Image (cartoon, helix red, strand yellow):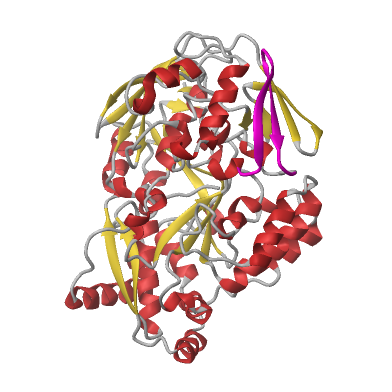
Amino acid sequence: MTPPRPPGGRRPPGRRGRITATTAALACLAALAACSGPPKDQGLTGKEVALSTTTPRARGEIDSFTWAVYAEPPTLDHTMAFDYPQNTILSNVCESLMRWTPGLTLEPGLARRASNPAPTTWVYDLRPGVRFHDGRTMTADDAVHSLNRQRDPDNAAAWAQSFQNVAAIRKTGPLQITVDLRKPDSQFPQYMATAAGVIASKAGVEAAGRDYGTTGGLACTGPFELGTWRKGQSIELERFDGYWGTRAKAKKAVFRILTDPSARTNALLSGEADGGYLIPTESYGRLRESGVGTLYFGEGLSTVNVNITNMRGPLGDVRVRRALSLALDRSGFVKAGLGGAGTATGSLTTRAAWASASEQTRRAAFASLPPTAPDIRKATALIEEAGAKGKTLTVATSAIGQDVSLLATAVQAAGTRIGLDIRLRTIAPNAFTALFTDPRAREGIDMFPLTYYDSITDPLDLLTSFKTGAYLNFAGYSDKRYDTLVDRAVSVYRPEQRMRIEVELQNHAARQLLWIPVAEWPTALFLNKRITGAPATIAYMYYPWAADVGAAR
């Protein structure tokens, strides 16, 4: 499970401000080319977006490189690594039992082998001689301690749901741990390649106490270790020369915190930053034509959605949710909000997430989805039928990038056209994570733009979000039949059999519109001419990508 970038914040504007915002939104959607970004940036067309797995291999080592990130992590504790900024950095410092590859497949990580001798048993044999950044050598005790931190209810771990079926984690040898499950869990072994499976030094974590992740080292095993953290400015990683794997090609990686999208783009164009993921969509064209580097796209396993956070009001009526979905101009949003690099969709899950299913199962998963073309007449009728005309809803927005801000205004424009009163509320980019961790941050918000990336290549990663009590089930949706289907799917290890159940879940979520799906969105990566080697896919969230970055010439 995984969230990305939301918005929300200050008091709603006064009535005059709402009218102005609505007019601007309608004008923008009526003239998309004029609203798709800065002057002379026409974005991309679908034909120009070819997906790559990685970038050309580095030709040699480099002293350092600088990377642009859109927000400062509140902590670098891996148990709270549940958003883009934290994982982009931590994937190079802390490693997991298994590893995601740039091709989005699984391979051994800190565990040289994973075995499943019984449906409720997973055994991980650890690599010998792996050193932590604090100088200690990794043992089974460290692995048991690390995984149990994720399960500790007092630790507020963002990944706790991945351990919901774990009964015990035992040391069964100096370099072996055994995970006992209460019932078969097809998702657990996949999550061991994410931040959920990170192994850190038990002694190092205990010595840091509550300060772990905010001061001092992280006592992990990755190709880089935490260097200087200048709050509000930058985070530096230093190459760890005691690394068990292939040594990083750069001696240092510097992450510049640039919350303003224009500032990030200008840093990439000027060379102040050598590269970055999550490129502002309004800058795709400028960067592509700049001549200072290359804009790449890779599989993102990402869908852009409108997250429904409150079903106690008008959105509790599925007819209102369907009406909003029918009124949305998805194709217009893809052009304006995603710079043309995306595909309108009525599916909450990406097509790539179904790659291991048969063709018949894949067709079934996408055969009965809501339409993506607007139907204002039908949407208006649904609002009238639900008695929701004139009802007020609040959507959160943010200056993180136009993918967020334009989706919020697109929702406002859609609602206005069908008789709803939709208001915008803005929060700062650095406050994004609070929407996922603090219910108080969501008070007064009915929905927000959410780009969801799968942490594993399984549709269930997203579809479990609507189970009763799930981490991202902010609206409190509950359906016993849906819960039963989730449990059935989780218990099946064979992908094809499991995905047939997931088709039912997909269709249920689509009918209920628990989130409103808008578009599939690839990963965007920009590298200037000085560096190369970074993967182009969303693997960078859990793969030590910075170790591959080196000299391009």
Say which of 23 and 286 sits in front.
23
Q: Residue 6, percent across and down? A: 39, 54
96 horizontally vs 255: left or right? right
Q: Residue at x 67, y 15 (%)?
A: 175
Q: How many numbered discs sit on the rendered protein?
A: 0
Q: Residue 60, percent across and down? A: 49, 16
Q: Residue at x 61, y 44 (%)?
A: 164
Say which of 503 and 406 sits in front.
503
Is residue 551 at least partly visible in the picture? no
Question: What is the chief secondary structure element of the magenta stretch?
Answer: strand
Work out whether 215 lies above or below 422: above
Residue 109 colored in magenta in the image: no
Q: Residue at x 35, y 82 (%)?
A: 391
Say which of 479 and 1 sits in front.
479
Work out whether 477 lies above or below 120: below
The segment highlighted magenta reads 164-183
Q: Residue at x 46, y 78 (%)?
A: 327
Is residue 398 at least partly visible in the picture? yes
308 horizontally vs 160: left or right? left
Residue 172 colored in magenta in the image: yes
Q: Residue 242, percent across and down? A: 51, 9
Q: Residue 116, percent across and down? A: 78, 32
86 horizontally vs 95: left or right? left
